[in-house]
Every structure is written in C-alpha cells, then in structure tokens.
C-alpha cells in the first residue's frame, strides 16, 4: 500500500482550529460568566474558520470539496447498512456517512455562531446584532444558542465514536491522517491532493475580511 496525500494543510489547519475553538467555547459558555469576553471572541474566530471551510469546500483541493463527499441517499443507506454489519467499502476521502456528518456539523456550528451574534449575557456583553432585531426574536435566537451546544456535544461524541469504530474495526487511521494528511491506499494513484493557491487565498482572505469586520463592531 502507498500513502496518498488526502487532507492538505488548509483542511487540517481548519479542522484542528475548529476543535480548539469549539472546546474553548464550551468551557467559557458553560462556566460562571467570568470569561464571557473570551467566549465572544472565540465565537468570532470559529465563525471565520467555518466561513473559510465553506469557501474551501468550493474552491479547495479535490478531497476538500463538498461535491466529493455528498452522495446519493441510496448509497448513504447502503453504506450505513454495511457499517452495521461490520463491513464497509474503503473510501480515500470521506465515506457517505462521514460526508453527512461533516455537513451536519458545519450547519449546526453555523447556526450556533449566527444565533450568538444576536445574543446577550444580559449584563455586559451584547452580540453585535442584538439591537437589530425585536426582543422576541432575540429571545428566540438566544434560546437556540443556549440549547444547541448540547446537540453539538452529542454530534461531536457520535463523530468521535465513528472515528474510533473505523480505527478499531477497519484499522483506518483517521486521526493520524488528519495530522499528517495521508491515508493508505491499495492501488497506485497518479494524483495526490494538491493545494490550489487561489482557493487558499480566496478562502482565508474572505474569512479574514469577515473576522476584521466583525471584530470592529462594538459589543
């Protein structure tokens, strides 16, 4: 078997940035409120990382693109059945179930940071768009923002369990692959994942512009 570069450096950087920021947000969000300033700014950081990941899903390397891991529902169902039976076709990129998990996590985290922009701790900190909506809508968005972390924690736990299942059952070293970017493949491939410079510049540049604009809005 040869090792093939699947996850290029932007994907790995964005993935682990999401892990660190999400962990910090959970800790500061469920704490006593003393670190609410950190919670706000880490939320801004997470929003920028997700913006970059979404843009890179259209402009990035082959295995980073959404079109590479969005499968037909029939294929998703068939693969799910195979997994339950302890079998599963090997995929170099995301498999059908893993692809669905990526989309669900991105959507859920996007809903989390978007609702945070309209939320307040009702003491010192107010989301940048808190005053732009009615109190009723703000209360609804705030309720979603405070409830969704438990859903996200459940999704993250499911994601980790799925990774462990693949590690133990199929000997697929997914954690290591997300560190060095390479996965083993039984056949020789002519093309490895290549990082498009324009895609990186547009994705990271767009995310940075969003972050700078957001950072300069009073809270």
Image (cartoon, grey):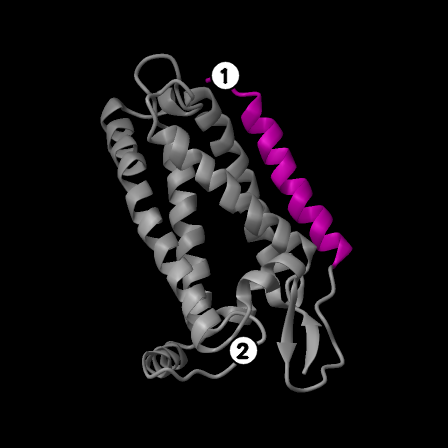
- Image height of 8 relative to 4, above or below: above
On the image, the x and y values in percent for residue 204 come to: 66, 44
Determine which quarter of the picture holds residue 9.
bottom right
On the image, the x and y values in percent for residue 17 come to: 56, 44
Determine which quarter of the picture holds residue 119.
top left
Q: Is residue 209 found left or right of 110 in the rendered image?
A: right
**Tag 2 secondary structure:** loop
Q: Nearer the viewer, residue 198 or 123?
A: 123
Rendered residue at 72%/82% (across/down): 189
Image quadrant containing the N terminus: bottom right
Magenta region, main secondary structure: helix
Q: Is residue 190 found left or right of 94 in the rendered image?
A: right
- Report the number of discs: 2
Which residue bears the numbered disc 2?
91
- Image height of 168 relative to 159, above or below: below
Q: Residues within 10 Å of mark 2 (few under 14, many from 20)?
A: few
What is the distance, in whole Å, between disc 2 and disc 1 at their CAs? 46 Å
State whether residue 69 appears in this view.
yes
On the image, the x and y values in percent for residue 163 come to: 45, 65
**Tag 1 secondary structure:** loop
Which residue bears the numbered disc 1?
218
Determine which quarter of the picture holds residue 30.
top left
Rendered residue at 36%/30% (across/down): 29
User: In the image as oriented, which residue stretches furthest toward the bottom?
Assistant: 187
Marks 2 and 1, the one that precedes in the sequence? 2
Name the mark nearer the viewer: 2 or 1. 2
Q: Is residue 2 found left or right of 179 in the rendered image?
A: right
Q: Is residue 211 magenta?
A: yes
Q: Report the magenta residues as a range.
A: 196-219
Q: Residues within 10 Å of mark 1 (few under 14, many from 20)?
A: few
Rendered residue at 61%/67% (across/down): 63
């Amino acid at each position: 078997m040869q090792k093939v570069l699947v996850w290029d450096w932007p994907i790995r950087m964005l993935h682990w940035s999401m892990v660190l920021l999400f962990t910090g947000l959970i800790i500061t969000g469920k704490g006593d409120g003393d670190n609410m300033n950190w919670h706000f700014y880490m939320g801004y950081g997470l929003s920028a990382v997700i913006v970059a990941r979404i843009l890179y899903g259209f402009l990035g390397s082959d295995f980073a693109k959404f079109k590479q891991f969005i499968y037909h529902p029939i294929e998703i169902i068939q693969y799910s059945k195979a997994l339950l039976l302890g079998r599963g076709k090997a995929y170099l990129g995301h498999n059908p179930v893993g692809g669905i998990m990526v989309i669900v996590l991105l959507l859920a985290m996007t809903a989390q940071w978007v609702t945070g922009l309209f939320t307040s701790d009702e003491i010192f900190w107010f989301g940048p768009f808190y005053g732009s909506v009615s109190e009723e809508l703000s209360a609804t968005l705030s309720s979603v923002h405070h409830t969704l972390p438990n859903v996200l924690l459940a999704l993250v736990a499911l994601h980790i369990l799925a990774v462990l299942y693949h590690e133990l059952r199929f000997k697929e070293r997914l954690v290591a692959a997300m560190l060095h970017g390479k996965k083993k493949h039984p056949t020789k491939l002519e093309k490895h994942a290549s990082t498009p410079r324009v895609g990186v510049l547009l994705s990271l540049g767009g995310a940075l512009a969003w972050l700078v604009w957001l950072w300069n809005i009073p809270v």
